[in-house]
């Protein structure tokens, strides 16, 4: 993840950080020779341990990921797929046929391989995506005649939801229809922009797909086609709290809640929107919030918003400048062995 910072109220704080991190190499080399941290490293650790009071922040975040929804061109042979769904040769083909919409079923029944196929292909993509994102495809008998890939087989037997379930479903479909479906998912890159404002007893954050939408008075909904392409509903939202009242707007829906008395754990309504901002304020660390980690040498550990413990190591070049973070989760936790590399710019 790469993060660019801006915003008038943060100029002074980030100018100090920037000057220190781009400071004299001679001082850095002297500190390293003495066995201590360079001024650049000290500035980085100080910011993550005790960030400045932030009144306003605008940031652009570069995200990489994988989308598991089908696009029209992911169906490489509509004729073979249509033949399988018209006269299902196996249980998974029968299942997909049974769950098609009426319109798709009617077009499929009339399809003979010679008529224009764009409308049928569009409907099949939409109906199959509905299955990918809504239910678990796997049953032993349903895939008895399908040779599963090691990646798909390794995910079986786990309680999966959301993106993990969609990933397994796409892998299963690729294994079952590898002559008709092009791949098991597509990598994507995109930018999001956000604005945060904070003052005592009040907080506001807005995340948008581009700067124009960030400046707009409304919050744009993430539509179906964008979700298939890898966007999440919370890629466009506004949320915050005032004293003990909290709210969020996601995909056009306003939700209200109240912060509990005497608790440091905010309800999900606030935690979800704050995942991305807290990661930005922590300079790439997935900690639950700012000022929640302490460094020991170039290593630290903390807890993310899902309650999982992570370990992080700061990477420093020969001039004593921070160049990145290596973040790992212990093997026994969910998403075991996941490694994230954050490049600091």
Image: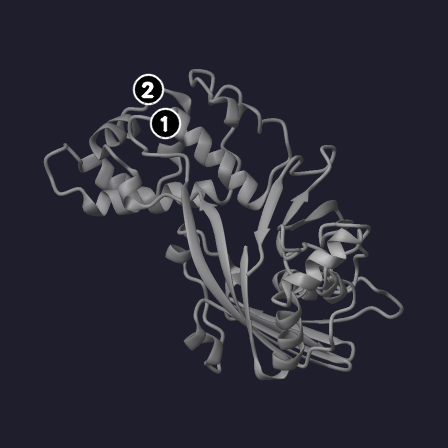
On screen, residue 294 versus residue 5, left or right, reads right
Q: Is label 1 in a helix, a strand or a loop? A: helix
Vertical side of 274 occupied by 285: above or below: above
How many angstroms separate mark 1 from mark 2 (CA)?
7 Å
Q: Residues within 10 Å of mark 1 (few under 14, many from 20)?
A: many
Vertical side of 44 occupied by 238: above or below: below
Residue 323 location, quadrant:
bottom right
Identify residue for label 1: 93
- At x 83%, y 64%, the residue is 264
Vertical side of 53 occupied by 148: above or below: above
Q: Position of residue 122 (x, y in %)?
A: 27, 47
Q: Position of residue 23 (x, y in %)?
A: 64, 68
Task: For the residues labelled 1 and 2, say whether their Cβ atoms are less than 8 Å apart.
Answer: yes
Instruction: Say the numbered circle drawn on residue 76.
Output: none
The colour scheme used here is one colour
Q: Nearer the viewer, residue 322 or 120?
A: 322
Residue 14 location, quadrant:
bottom right
Instruction: Say the numbered circle drawn on residue 89.
Output: 2
Q: Quadrant of the C terminus?
A: bottom right
Q: Position of residue 127 (x, y in %)?
A: 37, 44
Residue 262 location, quadrant:
bottom right
Q: Quadrant of the N terminus?
A: bottom right
Q: Position of residue 221 (x, y in %)?
A: 46, 67
Tally of numbered discs: 2
Vertical side of 332 occupied by 134: above or below: below
Q: Residues within 10 Å of mark 2 (few under 14, many from 20)?
A: few
Q: Is label 2 in a helix, a strand or a loop? A: loop
- At x 13%, y 43%, the residue is 116
On screen, residue 264 versus residue 112, left or right, reads right
- At x 44%, y 41%, the residue is 131
Q: Nearer the viewer, residue 94 or 303?
A: 303
- At x 50%, y 70%, the residue is 252
């Amino acid at each position: 993840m790469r993060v660019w910072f801006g915003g008038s109220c943060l100029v002074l704080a980030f100018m100090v950080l920037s000057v220190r991190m781009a400071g004299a190499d001679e001082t850095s080399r002297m500190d390293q020779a003495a066995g201590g941290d360079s001024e650049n490293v000290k500035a980085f650790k100080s910011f993550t341990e005790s960030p400045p009071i932030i009144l306003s922040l605008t940031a652009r975040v570069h995200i990489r990921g994988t989308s598991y929804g089908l696009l029209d061109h992911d169906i490489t042979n509509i004729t073979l797929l249509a033949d399988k769904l018209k006269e299902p040769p196996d249980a998974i083909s029968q299942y997909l046929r049974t769950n098609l919409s009426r319109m798709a079923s009617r077009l499929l029944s009339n399809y003979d391989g010679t008529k224009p196929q764009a409308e049928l292909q569009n409907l099949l993509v939409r109906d199959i995506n509905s299955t990918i994102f809504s239910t678990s495809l796997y049953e032993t008998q349903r895939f008895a005649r399908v040779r599963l890939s090691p990646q798909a087989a390794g995910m079986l037997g786990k309680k999966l939801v959301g993106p993990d379930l969609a990933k397994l479903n796409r892998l299963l479909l690729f294994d079952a229809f590898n002559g008709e479906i092009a791949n098991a998912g597509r990598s994507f890159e995109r930018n999001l922009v956000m604005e945060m404002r904070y003052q005592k007893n009040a907080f506001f954050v807005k995340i948008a797909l581009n700067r124009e939408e960030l400046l707009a008075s409304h919050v744009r909904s993430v539509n179906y086609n964008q979700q298939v392409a890898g966007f999440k509903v919370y890629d466009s939202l506004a949320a915050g709290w005032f004293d003990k009242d909290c709210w969020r707007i996601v995909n056009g829906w306003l939700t209200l809640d109240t912060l509990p008395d005497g608790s440091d754990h905010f309800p999900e309504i606030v935690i979800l929107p704050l995942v991305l901002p807290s990661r930005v304020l922590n300079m790439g660390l997935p900690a639950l919030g700012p000022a929640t980690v302490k460094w020991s040498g170039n290593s630290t550990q903390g807890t993310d918003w899902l309650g999982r413990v992570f370990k992080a190591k700061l990477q420093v070049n020969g001039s004593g400048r921070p160049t990145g973070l290596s973040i790992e989760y212990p093997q026994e936790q969910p998403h075991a062995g996941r490694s994230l590399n954050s490049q600091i710019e």
